[in-house]
Amino acid sequence: MKELSDYLLAIRTAGSPPGPPGVKTVDVTPEDDTGDITAAAIAGLRRSGLTPADFRSRAIFMAPDDPICLVPYAMLCGFAGRRIDAYAGDTVMEFSRLDPQGHAFPDAGRPSGHLMWAQAGGPNTPDAVGMPTVRLAPGTPRLATPETVTVIRYAARLRMVPPPATRDVLAMFLLIAAIRRRSDDRFAYLSTGTEPAPVIKDDPTQGIDLEKIRRAAVDHRRQQRAARRSAEVVDRVPVSAHEQRIAQANRADIAQVLTRLGSTADPAGRWHCPRPIRHANNDGNPSLILYGDNRVRCQRCDTEKIGPVRLIIDALGLTPDEAAALIADSTRTLGPRVV
C-alpha cells in the first residue's frame, strides 16, 4: 500500500489537508463563486499552472472533508486523462488502479422505456420524487445487484447522493463512473440536497454537473496541447563548446558515476541514492532506479529521470561546468556515499 511520501505531486483545494513534506504541492482552488461552478473550477486549474506533463509523475489529490471535493476531483480526472489517487480519511486511496471493467458488471437488461433521470446513493438514501432510486453499500461494489446496475448504466442523467464519509464519496463516485463508462466517461451529477421535483430533461437545478466539469477540463488540456504545437519555430543555433562539454559528460556511463559517488546496487538492480540525507532511513532500502537511456530517478528526490550531470549537480552542489569537469576526470573520486 502506498504512503503519501511515495508521491511526487500533491494537489490541494479549499479545505484540503496540507501536502506531505518534500512533495511538490499545487493549489487548484476555484476562483470566487461567480455563479458558474464549471468556469470557476477551470479558472482555478488555469491559475495553478498545471500541465498534462505534470501527471506523468505520481500525483495525489488531497481531498477536503466535504462532498464538494468531487468538483475539483472530476476536473483533475478530465485534465489528467485518467483516475488519480486521493488522500481522504487519513488514508491513501489508489484509484489509479481502479478496475476498468465496470462495463462487465451484470445488469438486468436495457429498460423497456427511455430512462431520463435516476438517483443513486448509499443504503439510507431516501427515494426521489419523479425518478427511480438505487442504493449502493460503501466498499462492496461487487454486491451491486443487476437491477441497480441497470439503472446506473442506462439512465441518461444520474444524480448521486453522497454518503457521509469523504472516502465513501470518492469510492462511490468512481464505482458509478466505472459502471456508466462506454467509449468515454459519463460522470454523474452531485446532489446538493436542495434539488426540486419534478425534473425535466435538461434541468440545471438537479445538482452539480460533474460530467460538464470533466469535459471542460478535457477541453482545457486540448487547448494547452494545441498551443504547444503552434509554437514559433526559430532558427537553429550552433551548439557552443561549453554545451558540447556538458553533452559529452551526459554520455558517461551513469552506473560508473553512481559507483564513483559511493553508491551500490542490490541484487534486484536498485541503487542506493547518493543523497542519503534526504531519506528518513538514509536510503537503507534502495530507492534509485537506473534506466536503459542512461538516466536514473530516485523515488524520493527526483520528479523525473535525470542524467549524470544533473545527478552530480544535485548530489554535490556543483555547477554544470564543475560537474562536467569531474566526470571528464575519471581518476578523481567523487566522494563516498555519506550515511
Image (cartoon, rainbow, N blue to C red):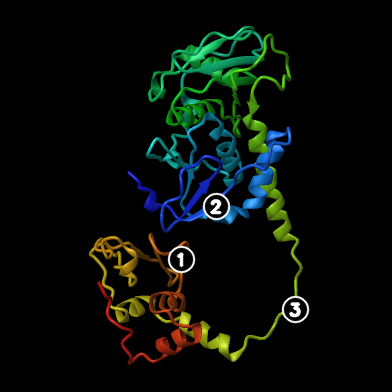
Location of residue 148 in the rendering, given as x and y in whole percent from the top left corner = 49, 14
Please name whichever residue, 306 or 282, is drawn nearer the observer in this view of the structure: 282
**What label does residue 58 carry, if any?**
none
Location of residue 193 in the rendering, given as x and y in whole percent from the top left corner = 59, 18
**What label does residue 305 carry, if any?**
1
Q: Amino acid at mark 2?
A: Val
Q: Amino acid at mark 3?
A: Asp
Please name whichever residue, 279 or 292, is drawn nearer the observer in this view of the structure: 279
Q: Quadrant of residue 190?
A: top right
Identify the residue position indicated by label 2 in the image.
Answer: 26
Instruction: For label 1, count other residues whose C-alpha is less than 10 Å away and answer few (under 14), some (14-19) or many (20+).
Output: some
Q: Secondary structure at mark 3?
A: loop
The span from disc 2 to disc 3 (Cα, nearest Å) is 35 Å
Q: Secondary structure at mark 1?
A: loop
Q: Can you say which quadrant of the picture contains the N terminus? A: top left
Q: Quadrant of residue 161?
A: top right
Identify the residue position indicated by label 3 in the image.
Answer: 235
Q: Residue at image x 29%, y 65%? A: 269
- CB-based contact (under 8 Å), mark 1 and mark 2: no
